Image: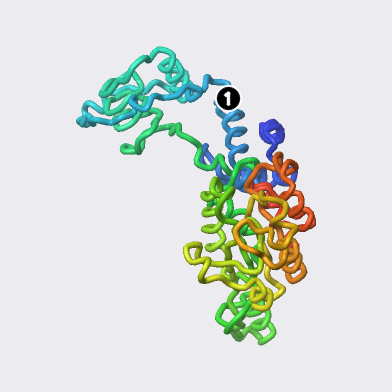
Amino acid sequence: MLVDFFYTLRKAQVPVTIKELLTLLEALEKNLAFGSWDDFYLLARTCLVKDEKYFDRFDLAFGHYFKGLAELPDPFDNVVPEQWLESDFIKNLSDEEKAEIERLGGLDKLMETLAKRFEEQKKRHAGGSKWIGTGGTSPFGHSGYNPEGVRIGGESKHKRAVKVWEKRQFKDLDDSVELGTRNIKVALRKLRKFARTGAAEELDLDDTIRSTANNAGLLDLKMVPERHNAAKVLLFFDVGGSMDPYIKQCEQLFSAARTEFKHLEYFYFHNCVYERVWKDNKRRWNEHIDTFDLLHTYGRDYRVIFIGDASMAPYEVSERFGSVEHRNPESGAVWLQRILDNWDKAIWLNPSHPRYWQYTASTQMIKQIMGNKMYPLTLEGMEDGIRYLSK
């Protein structure tokens, strides 16, 4: 059975190997999951999936193979009108009334019946026992009571639903989607490097055992400095103009980066980096930072990440006085090259779709200056860029 499941996962493009399948079989032989679908699901996912971005594909394959969900009509191919799920009252049932409510009889029957309800129901229902609605004893809806139902919307009250059919909260972990804060953290985490710094405050168990054995069994504690995140990152955000549609993505990236890196500095620029950057957009004309100062302040062990769509007039990259908002004494290309010469590892994350890059001259110019180290702001693009910075 598990061999067929293994090939189902491969067909769903989950990169599982024979070694991982053998790990799952060994875990089952040791009864790490017995008599519970939930336990088996968690164990299988732990053994077979090595990257969070494949969780969604694993869930779909698991549901298709073990529960046949893909073979059933999908009720949520239909859209539930919002008014059907508005809860204006809640029916209070006695224990005797609750005991009289019957189950439909299994998940398959439940899902088949739900599909029929979608075909038959034409209007909102509340307080009933059959239709999709609220506040009643129907197996479908929310804010009511049924010993075995499907909660649609609302919040759990009696903990009786056998399925909560809502939008998948982790679906955006797939490679092709734009990033959210959580999966940005997953990608950035691969850049983190640890070093032991400070006073010796953490027990070194292996060295303690070895030293105690060499000391004829007399306890000899060995301590080491605590491990700290040693990755150092400089973030440069393009703001304003054509970057306005990407504000949310940049905010998510900024939020995730601040929680993942202890040594993080950030700066803003507009369109291209010139002789000055800033940290407060409201005061950027009065409180700016000389880019030369950055080159002499932060060590060469920092990693540099530019975030911008690289879309501007070509003159803003190639010419002095080409900036759209001030007379820059030197071109943007000169300043980008100075940064690249100072910090060996630098990438450019572009929130616009790669299919448009070839149509913008400035994007091609900056991509060339960056040595083609320009990546789309998607999970896959982030991982490719972080992989390069980690080398």
Q: Secondary structure at mark 1?
A: helix
Q: Dot 1 surroundings within 10 Å: few (below 14), some, or many (20 or more)?
A: few
The residue closer to the viewer here, 252 or 187, is: 252
**Mark 1 sits on what residue?**
70
Classify residue 132 by image quadrant: top left
Considering the image in quadrants, where does the C terminus appear? Answer: bottom right
Q: Residue at x 37, y 25 (%)?
A: 140
Specify the amino acid type for callout 1. Ala
Q: Is residue 113 visible?
A: yes
Q: Who is closer to the viewer here, 32 or 21?
A: 21
For residue 181, side relative to residue 192 (left or right): left
Q: Depth check: give the residue in front, 253 or 103.
A: 253
Residue 124 placement, left or right of 310: left
* Color scheme of the displayed model: rainbow
Residue 195 against residue 68 in the figure, above or below: below
Q: Position of residue 160 (x, y in %)?
A: 36, 34
123 w.r.t. 185: above or below:
above
Residue 318: % across, % down:
75, 58
